Amino acid sequence: MAVTADELGTQDIKKLLIKQAVPSSIGILFMSVNILIDTIFVGQWIGSLAIAAVTVVLPITFLISSLGMAIGVGGGSVLSRALGSNHKEKALHVFGNQIMMTFLLSSVFVFFGVFFSDEMLLLFGAKGEIMKPAKEFFFPIILSVPFLALCMMGNNIIRAEGKAKFAMIAMIIPAFVNIALDILFIKVMNLGMFGSALASAISYFMCFVFVLWFFVFKSELKLKAKHFEFKIPIVREITELSFVTFSRQGVVSILAIIINHTLYTYGGEHSVVIYGIISRMLMFALFPILGITQGFLPIAGFNYGAMNYERVKESVQLSIKYAAFLATLIFVVILIFARPIVAIFTTDSLVIAQTPEALRWVFAASPIISIQLIGAAYFQAAGKAKKALLLTLSKQGFFLIPLVLILPNFLGIFGVWIAFPIADILSTILTGYFLKKEMNTKLIQTTDGIL
């Protein structure tokens, strides 16, 4: 399934998309299945409030660990260019600085998380009966976050080295470990929320062990003590490129805070449980669309750099077409099987009764989201950082957060659910406008050359 640089510029776009999208989809699938099954286990074996607790805690851990992802993505770009220009020593300093930045920053956040746990949990929506299971789940998870952050950072560096197979394995390992330990700790040993958190913490550590093994035995990046010394220009370069990724996760975390508080205000603990199920389905059901988006990036980026704009346009059009087809198929499945899907997660009759309608509304505009996702990805591939950031943050930051703050005042809980398709539609219109303008002005190629 490997693709050479020359093939990105010459091979049939359809074949390229399949070769690039399948490995990405597999990695996202395993990550999503892990979270999905974890939610099913806690819902069925512990109770519906356990889903609410997980819904509150995970945005905290993902926010902290996303430091590792951001440093990995930003530093990976610097590292790749250093390797490409044969500056091996700079690449080693970049990697060493990434490790130190990830470990130190995540450890600082963990310190504050441990000593201000009640305040942090309340901020993210752990109110009423949700607080007790949330605290049980929080402490083992928060202590393992530096390992998760280092894994997320390391995974991006593995990809930057061109070792996609090992990067995929790194995503698969914690899924299998977590599922197996969930069964042992929750079902067999009856450890409840603590058992669920312990399973996740150990799975993060095992992922870290694999990543460490890779860099010790398989990587071309052999570090020495001097490479861990901070270099201000390198730190600055990594930080600047990491900002977009961390900003995106920051907006997602702010959205989680607002939604959890709004749902509790208008519907109590059960509404937070409902959103917990829906958010897991959003992560799981859309994995093939996200896989196409990731597969599209290197194709569009290479051909844009080669000024082969006709191939860029073809890759945009085909990616949107394929992703729209899959998204429509997913929506139809959700529309028809919403109730059986919800019943997998919990036996709570109230949750089962109220969640299907909410799930259908949240997914209502999913057939058109391919335009938003591929459009934002195109501007990233073309190196247009400002537009990429604008369009990436448009749904959550510019539309969904204001809608969630406004609509429930008039529509109650329904206002939260209807905010999702409205935000999808508005962000798609915005992205579609910029993308169409780009296609009609920037990506024009004639027999006389490129205009």
Image (cartoon, rainbow, N blue to C red):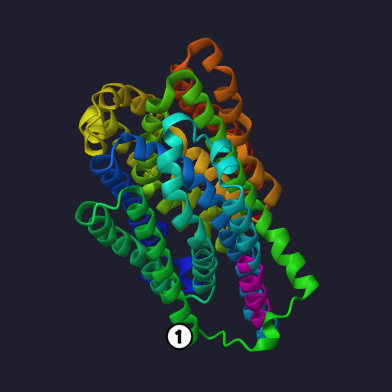
- For the residue labelled by badge 1, is the local secondary structure a helix, a strand or a loop? loop
Please, what is the three-letter code of the amino acid marked with disc 1?
Answer: Lys
Viewer-side residue, 116 vs 364: 116
Quadrant assignment, res 440: top right
Q: Quadrant of the N terminus?
A: bottom left
Task: Work out whether 78 lies above or below 359.
Answer: below
| Residue, disc 1 | 218
The number of numbered badges drawn on the structure is 1
Residue at 42% x, 58% y is 13
Viewer-side residue, 136 vs 80: 136
Q: Position of residue 292 (x, y in %)?
A: 42, 52
Q: Position of residue 406 (x, y in %)?
A: 59, 18
* Magenta span: 91-103
Other residues around mark 1 within 10 Å, as few (<14) / some (14–19) / many (≥20): some
Viewer-side residue, 126 vs 425: 126
Q: Is the magenta region chiefly helix, strand or loop? A: helix
Whether residue 37 is visible to the viewer of this picture, yes or no, is yes
Task: Work out whether 207 lies above or below 91.
Answer: above
